[in-house]
Amino acid sequence: MKFTLSWLKEHLQTDATLDEICARLTMIGLEVEEVDDKAAFKPFVIAKVLSAEKHPQADRLKVLMVDTGSGAPVQVVCGAPNARAGLVGAFAAPGTYVPGIDVTLAIGNIRGVESRGMMCSEKELEISDSHDGIIDLPEDAPVGTSFAAYAGLDDPMIEINLTPNRPDCTGVYGIARDLAASGLGTLKPRLTPTFAVDGDTPTGLKIELDDERLCPGFALRLVRGVKNGPSPKWMQQRLLAIGLRPISALVDITNYMTFDQGRPMHVFDAAKVKGNLVVRRAKDGEIVLALDEREYKLNPSNVVISDDDGVESIGGIMGGEHSGCDENTTDVLIESALWDPMNIAKSGRSLGIITDARYRFERGADPEYMVPGLERTTELVLACCGGTAAKARVEGYKGYDAKVVDFPLSEVKRLTGLEVSADESKSILTKLGFSVSGSGERISVAVPSWRPDVDGKADLVEEIMRIHGVDNIKPQPLTSHGAVNGKILTTLQIRTRTAKRALASRGMLEAVTWSFISEDQAKLFGGGSNALKLANPIAADMSDMRPSLLPGLLSAVQRNADKGYGDVAIFEVSGTYENDTPEGQRRVAGGIRRGTATLTGAGRMWSNAAKGGGKPVDVFDAKADALAVLEACGLPMGNIQIEQGGPAWYHPGRSGTIKMGPKVVLGYFGEFHPKTLEALDVSGALAGFEVYVDAMPEPKKKATRTKPALELSPFQAVKRDFAFVVDKSVEAGAIVRAAAGADRKLVTGVNVFDIFEGASLGEGKKSIAIEVQIQPADRTLTDEDFEALTQKIVANVTKSTGGMLRG
């Protein structure tokens, strides 16, 4: 939001300096982003041409002798057609920077004649686009004085970074109101426009909408007999100062109202409007040629103003070219309307239109200023263009129903720590336009029409705090509690960090991938529902929320491989999405290993091969990574169960499912199905996993028993080997669990060390060999003890798996 200092002081009676105003604006939440003090225009002075002689070497150039007020005349070579003796204009001496042409002047020699400066045109001083001749001032203009001060070019420009919740400050008047409330002056009241009204506005007006919120009000007035010429100089200067190009009086007035009062207006050429004006939803595929000379294809979500010929304006966003005003306009229809902020935002975004009107309407224009805004615009049109105003027509507006907030004054202290008296709090709210009633600790506060962002108690506290002054909060050290006993992070946060640390320690690099993937990838990994499709995706291949981390990680791995880095191990701990509810968002730790990026090393190196490295990654590498995450998160690994197989995107014979109990699925791991890799255009040796961090059961609040003291047995541990012949469908883990359960006190470890399949075992059979570690605790075991334990182990395995001890 840009404005000039003199523009602000038109609404604010204050003696404050520019620096004081800028400091106060930032203090009350209207952060100053840029200040242009117009110092670039200070070197220009008013000068008078004493003589103008033809250049001896050029027909179109003249040699001027110029009185700059310094005493001795200055010689200037000038090519302007209006250069003549007696002309008073703007002079720039050597060394002056000329902003309109981006040039710093120097003493020049033009066709053999020395030139010590320049007589400037309006374009060179950024007054207008005119460069047909040099500036021609009245004869009584004071020679030798500052041209910027004389022409009003020394008016500083201020730009504030306006937050989306402050529609009231999209106009200079609203900014002045805030400064006055902060004590930096007195707000000048809006004067009630006074002008004669003759006749009615004949153009019919209808609001034909299925939802009255889309256009809560519409005001219209006919003004006959206008003359659309240039706008007044003061208005042009203000618009130019904030970067707007003056066009014509009618257009400039609507732009001026937009920035002066925060009230976007629109003016139709009445002669180009056929029949009644109708506010309605656009028809699907309807086309409108807008004022930016571009055609827009509309749909029923857009609200338009139309006549018998079709769409004349996109409501609240941009007018149509067909009914725009030009130099031949004599009768105008001035429109002042209200629009639904959400609809304006969605329509503007979908159509790709950014305008000053949209900027204000999507934040919420003041409904109570709809009709007064029409009156003020009419007054400006009559003053600048003449004409006769008809009686206004107002449709749809039902008045403003103020929100009333029950406000305990103690909330200021509770939420901010500021000690603000009750009287000061009430005074601040009153100065900001709030209506305060009641006495005591609780008061009722009615919210003014220009503050749609204020809904509750916290909003009122914010208003009091920013006007009272955030700089009044005195810095204080934090209270020392000696020690922090309570847990700060949640269990999920702790486990997220722990999972990242565990995977990083295993040589994997953390990646951050997009939460959006293509529809085909989403369906490939169990997603693709309509609830998870983006309404406005940033790219065609980012249309769905991801149901899994794996598509993004696989694509990232392939991109590395395409650039020559084939041995890659990456992970990500982030969110996936099963549905559009909060419960449907999962916290998942996922990882991918490619090529030879195993835990023991990567690449073709003889030393790695000797240590078991240098081999392609497989399902067991992914399994080890997944189990490492679970162990790091503190899950009891003895309760973890591994089942063969996983989702369809994994290889059916080289994947597994991690469970805790029969129902709780903790994750999946494995190598990938060839069809999955083909669909993603990914190749190479690949293995990956996903662990559901949020599916892990919460740890017990209090330990039911303390961890016993470490007791080391003084007796020798013994290892015994067993080989069982079982069906090929039997998992090795079942044999391990059965052997370990034979005697929990004596059996301290079971490991699988060999798997054999052959014709000698029989059809559909395999041999699994295990090593059982036996640790006596209170005595040396005898042969009878070992025999009894052996029988229990064999019996347990036979009962659980149907396996027979191999002879």
Image (cartoon, helix red, strand yellow):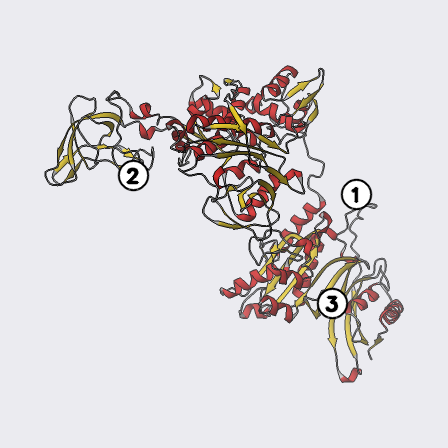
In this rendering, does residue 339 appear at all? no
Reading the chain from its start, which is encountered first: label 3 or label 2?
2
Number of callouts in the render? 3
Q: Is residue 796 above or below residue 711?
A: below
Residue 618 found in image quarter: bottom right
* Between 721 and 751, the one nearer to me in the picture: 751
Image location of residue 139, percent across then percent down: 24, 22
Packing grade of label 3 (10 A; few <14, some 14-19, many >=20) is some
Residue 698 left/right relative to 75: right
* Between 355 and 704, the one nearer to me in the picture: 355
Three-letter code for the amino acid on which mark 3 is drawn: Gly
Q: Secondary structure at mark 2?
A: loop
* Between 634 and 151, the one nearer to me in the picture: 151
Quarter that holds the C terminus: bottom right
Q: Which mark is residue 101?
A: 2
Which residue bears the numbered disc 3? 645
Image location of residue 756, percent across then percent down: 74, 77
Q: Residue at x 51, y 45 (%)?
A: 353
Residue 39 left/right relative to 463: left
In this rendering, does residue 392 appear at all? yes
Which residue bears the numbered disc 1? 701
Q: Nearer the viewer, mark 1 or mark 2?
A: 2
Q: Is residue 529 above or below residue 725?
A: above
Q: Which mark is residue 247?
A: none
Q: Residue at x 32, y 23 (%)?
A: 149
Three-letter code for the amino acid on which mark 1 is drawn: Lys
Q: Is residue 103 above or below residue 516?
A: above
Query: Alpha carbon of mark 1 to alpha carbon of mark 3: how far?
Result: 34 Å
Query: Alpha carbon of mark 3 to alpha carbon of mark 2: how far?
Result: 73 Å
Q: Is residue 599 above or below residue 268?
A: below
